[in-house]
Image: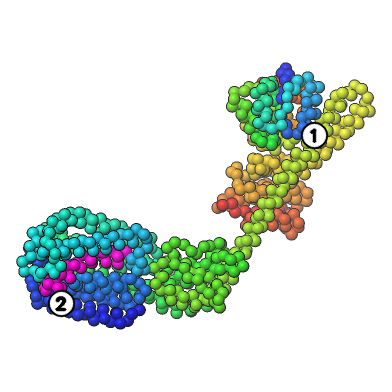
Amino acid sequence: MPTTVLIVDDHAGFRGFARRLLEAGGFTVVGEADDGASALAAVETLQPEVVLLDIVLPDIDGFAVAERLAENGDERVVVLTSSRDSADFGQRLERTPARGFIHKDDLSGPALARLAADAP
Amino acid sequence: MNRRLLVVLALAGAVVIAVAAVLVAFAHDFQPFGRAEKLAQVATDGIWIVTGLIAWQRRPGSRVGPLMTAVGFVEVTQQLYWNAALPFTIAELVAFFAFPIWLHLFLAFPSGRLQTRFERSLVTSTYAAIVVFSVFSQLSWDPRSDPHSTDCPNCPRNLLLVHRYHGLWSALGTAGVFWFIAVLVTAAVLLIVHVRRSSGATRRALAPVVLAAAAAAVLLGAVLVASAMGVPTEGSPLLWLADAAFAAIPIAFLVGLLRMRLHRSAVADLVLELDSLASPAKLEGALARCLGDPSLQVAFWLPDAHRYVNADGDAFDPAMPGRALTVLEHDGTRLAALAYDAALVDEPELVEAVGATATLALENARLEAQLRAQLAEVRASRARIVAAGDAARRRLERDLHDGAQQRLLGIRLALRLARGRVSGGDAAIDELLAAADAEVVGALDELRTLARGIHPAILTEDGLAAALSVLARRAAVPVDLTVCRERLPAPVEATAYFVAAEALANVVKHAHASRVSIDVARSNGEVAIEVRDDGSGGADAGGPGLRGLRDRVEALDGRLRVESPATGGSRIRAAIPCG
């Protein structure tokens, strides 16, 4: 099971709770980023195995970040998350190269581990 | 207008024509022309002078009359060729001037003014070239011993001869011919451009001239071809026909001018027509017919806004290059401006007469145009209000999502963490945490529903089709959805969405329907949204929900129709223009 994770979200409060929740679930949170650009930079330097990526970000959105990572040939696990319903994103979720989507309501260590363990 | 000048010129013309006719009839033999042919040319010159003077008298402000008269005088002067030294010298001096005057006349007709800088340069340089050429050749040409052209020992003396130098002719000969052809071709092209670009009054004036000139050119070509093939043309019907065509050119110029003037009688028709005019556009049409210029435009003055609008009430600037402008006033108050073909400009008094005749109608039309402009302004501001409302809704949805919702989510995660820590411990605390979590879940659900109702994020992100399919999936009634996939302008998408959402909400709340269908189709530049159900009917079309929808749809120039008979089944249909 992958253990290192980067949390990308523009809400510091959410990042704090998510970090504690995922650490309680057995993950090692190696870093946090609060927008798309710093997420790409953090992936480069921290090399996490999993990226938990909020969709609505202040600069480029999570879909765009996932696409950039895929374009770079990066094969690490990217999991999109949002407080909106998956239905609210329509077909964009079907088209994204990210591994999966997890609603913020449902976020937990085991839930993330299950998605990360799924074959791409 | 200087009437005395015209009388003097008329008398001078009569004398010159008579003298030329007598000289031609009784003096020398002519080569290569016959005597009758020569007389026909003199008659044509006379026609130029007569028609030119009539044009001058009718259109004193235009150069067309003087130019036509000048053509006649210059041409007839050449008929004095063979006789005494003085007329001979004068004839030789002015012989080539007919060319630039013709050029000037053709290019300046019918306004009397050369329109472009290029035309002005062409005509000016042609005049200058002919002056230089004529003066130099006259100072150096001895007709009695010219080895290059007619050797004419019996010719009268050239009074201006200073030094015999026939080299000038050969030096200029070839270059001169090429230059002449180049100018001729350029002029022909310019004339074609004139005809193509002109409209209404100008075209009507140009038509007879172009027709006569083309006929003359074709017939002259035929005569030249016949001569070249050795067919004798002297006295032939072909030659007479060509002469007649040339004589018709000045008449064509005059007819062209008079056709423009004929519209004066149309003012009387206008007076009769004005009574029955209902709209600014019809008034514009009547004025255009009256002035004989279909391109005429009326600009109505809005004193409050301090700008012009057209008949439809749209902003309009009547000052355009190549167009003449007459501002019409009544009691010192500006009413309107007429923008029309610059060729009409030489009859400002006619335009003013038309304007004065139409004062009352113009004032009425101006008020109507003003009303239309205000209506357009109100429409635009209504659309802006809707757009501003949509923007505010989008911001509100975003704020709810970013603010309260994120905090509630944080609480949920914290509760989940806490439950993890106490699991297997105090059952009462665990129960309490579970209850708190359920409350937070409820709050989040309500918040999401509220945000979605304000403005669904998917509408902005993925468009109407995606937003409606989410709406249909969440509805408590089965929905058959048919929707075109293409993206539409944001205000149209938002309005169409809210029509469907409001109608669907009404169905769920009141209609007890078993099925609903939503159809969105785009055709003929509009989007039609139709929501139908098989429920109880009897919806109140004047209720606040539907009233608000109607306002929204009408703000985009659309229409909303509600059919909800008490017998059951409802149909709400909105049509919104979308480019």
Q: Amino acid at mark 2?
A: Ala
Q: Is residue B169 visible?
A: yes
Q: Is residue A18 magenta?
A: no
Q: Residue furthest front?
A: B162
Residue B530 in the image: state x and y as whole percent. 65, 51
Residue B107 in the image: state x and y as whole percent. 32, 64
Residue at left 69%, top 48%? B391
Q: Dot 2: what SS?
A: helix
Label 1 chain ID: B
| In the rendered image, the vertical position of residue B392 relative to residue B160, given as above or below | above
Residue at left 86%, top 36%? B439
Residue B128 in the image: state x and y as whole percent. 26, 62
| In the rendered image, the vertical position of residue A29 relative to residue B118, given as above or below | above
Q: Quadrant of the N terminus of chain B?
A: bottom left
| In the rendered image, the vertical position of residue A48 relative to residue B296, given as above or below | above
Prevailing SS of the magenta stretch = helix
Q: Which mark is residue B34?
A: none
Q: Amino acid at mark 1?
A: Leu
Residue at left 25%, top 75%? B49
- Whether residue B348 sits left or right of residue B140 in the image: it is right
Q: Which residue is identified by label 1?
A: B409
Residue at left 27%, top 63%? B127
Question: Marks 1 and 2, Cα distance to the nearest angstrom?
Answer: 112 Å
Q: Is residue B216 visible?
A: no
Quarter of the view holding residue B120: bottom left
Residue B555 in the image: state x and y as whole percent. 66, 57
Q: Say if mark 1 contacts mark 2, CB within 8 Å.
A: no
Q: Dot 1: what SS?
A: helix
Q: Which residue is identified by label 2?
A: B21
What residue range appears in magenta? Answer: B80-107
Q: Is residue B106 magenta?
A: yes
